Image (cartoon, grey):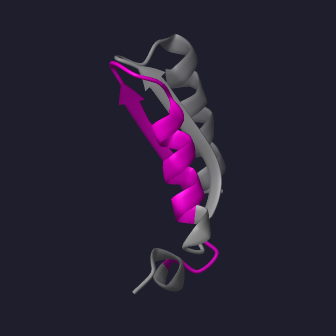
Amino acid sequence: MEPGCWLGQKPVALFGSYDWGTRDWMDAWKSAAQDAGVNVVQTVIANLEPGDDVLEQLCQLGNRLAQ
């Protein structure tokens, strides 16, 4: 079963971190999720550990998804 089938139009956020390479994996993940029918509303990515800016993005994202 495709994820979009059981998620419906619920908002979904993708987040993660990376050490080496580029951020391209997030774009690929977002595209694959959207192609499967997932309602991706935002992505957040950090290099290694999340800094204050990423933590703030995640806090805002959590508030947005909770509404």
Rendered view: 44 above or below 48: below
| Image quarter (top left, top right, bottom left or bottom right) of the C terminus | bottom right
| Image quarter (top left, top right, bottom left or bottom right) of the N terminus | bottom left
Location of residue 60 (image quadrant) = top right
Rendered view: 31 above or below 45: below
What residue is drawn where x is 62% and y is 58%?
A: 40
| Residue stretch in magenta | 7-33
Picture coordinates of residue 25, whole percent (x, y): 46, 40
* Residue 38 visible: no
59 or 53: nearer the viewer:
53
Whether residue 8 is in magenta: the answer is: yes
Picture coordinates of residue 58, whole percent (x, y): 53, 33
What residue is drawn where x is 35% and y is 17%?
A: 49
* Residue 50 visible: yes
53 or 47: nearer the viewer:
47
Picture coordinates of residue 53, whole percent (x, y): 57, 15
28 or 47: nearer the viewer:
28
Image position of 30 (left or right of 20): right
Image position of 47 (left or right of 44): left
Rendered view: 31 above or below 53: below
